[in-house]
Amino acid sequence: AKAAGRGNFQFFSADMNAATHERLLLESRLWQALDQGEFELFLQAQIELDSGRVIGAEALLRWHHPELGLVGPDRFIPIAEESGLILPLGDWVLKRAVQLLDRWRGMGLGHVRLAVNLSARQCHGTGLLAQLDSLLTSTGIDPALLELEITESAAMQDPERSRGLLQQLRSRGIKVAIDDFGTGYSSLSYLKLFELDRIKIDRGFVKDIETDPDDAVIVAATIGLAHALGLEVIAEGVETQAQASFLRSKHCDEAQGYLFARPGTLAEFEALAAAPARA
Ligand code: C2E
Ligand code: CA
Ligand code: CA
Ligand code: CA
């Protein structure tokens, strides 16, 4: 028993060391990474379900780490949040996003909307509105082409403040979407508290739409409720044709997921957005 115990301990400890090692590798380079140009925005298409057309994209951060290769945001956003780097990083993401909208306007993709994820710290900090104003006026981009995604949990860290921020964003014509809708503790109260344009139904509800009758009912009712409140609906994590058909039959406006496209490079997204619709 003793030997097994020690074995377990060693196993656990080796595991911890690997995790700690990775974290140190990430942490130590995180601040430099922004200066070194190691971040990239991947883009994932958003599809209008009626027409099959690409009507937008979500910007998803990636980090080209010199030793670890391509690193996804789940591995470094939490570290960036803790260390405060999320603020300059979030600024970079917004700046790059507006650059992309500007680029698309010049290449016949001027109708394509771009959605950007906001961290809790960005929402509750002070610089966001001023930065957006300066980016939008310097480029003359239509604010309605920019959508900001905020999660329920970020919004609820300071509901009154979030409410004010969302009002300010919408008064500028910027679109606001609630991300991961349905995963919070009081999703319905957000609909009343916040002025929104769109809700994003969380992947967790879409996943079992065909097999779990409860999920199917929840998704259908959420779409109906959102529409009755004048909101648009996008479903995330759509992986199968059957899920897309179900969503279309319930009049879900848009969808995003591996069925249509995985997050990819700018060039990949632009090729897809320029191609004819495949409904
Ligand atoms: P999210 O906002 O919920 O983004 C959707 C995630 O689901 C993305 O993961 C995307 O690659 C993945 N996904 C899309 N379609 C499918 C599908 O059909 N099936 C499955 N299984 N997954 C799908 P990703 O790119 O790893 O991003 C993870 C999270 O990192 C995002 O979740 C978002 O919360 C955060 N994030 C990404 N970019 C940024 C950013 O620029 N700023 C901030 N603050 N957070 C970001
Ligand atoms: Ca998102
Ligand atoms: Ca989401
Ligand atoms: Ca999510």
Image (spheres, grey):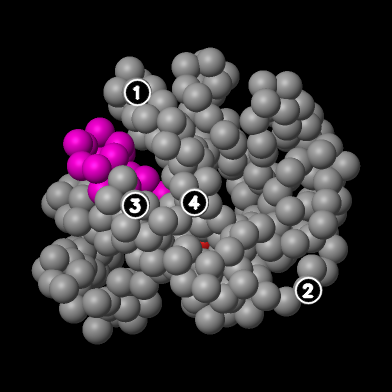
Amino acid tagged 1: Gly
Q: Quadrant of the C terminus?
A: bottom right
Q: Distance of mark 4 from mark 1, alpha carbons?
A: 22 Å
Residue placed under numbered mark 1 in the picture: 164
Residue located at (32% from left, 78% from top): 64
Crowding at label 4, few (<14), some or many (≥20) Cα neighbours within 10 Å? some
Q: Distance of mark 4 from mark 3, alpha carbons?
A: 9 Å
Crowding at label 3, few (<14), some or many (≥20) Cα neighbours within 10 Å? few
Label 2: element kind = loop
Residue placed under numbered mark 3 in the picture: 137
Residue located at (70% from left, 48% from top): 254
Q: Distance of mark 4 from mark 2, alpha carbons?
A: 24 Å
Q: Distance of mark 3 from mark 2, alpha carbons?
A: 32 Å
Which residue occupies the foreground of this view, 152 or 131? 131
The magenta stretch spans residue 34: no
Query: Residue 255, position in %: x, y?
Result: 69, 52
Residue placed under numbered mark 4 in the picture: 142
Q: Quadrant of the N terminus?
A: bottom left
Residue 276: mark: 2
* Residue 206 as seen in the image, left or right of residue 6: right
What residue span does the magenta drawing correspond to? 117-132
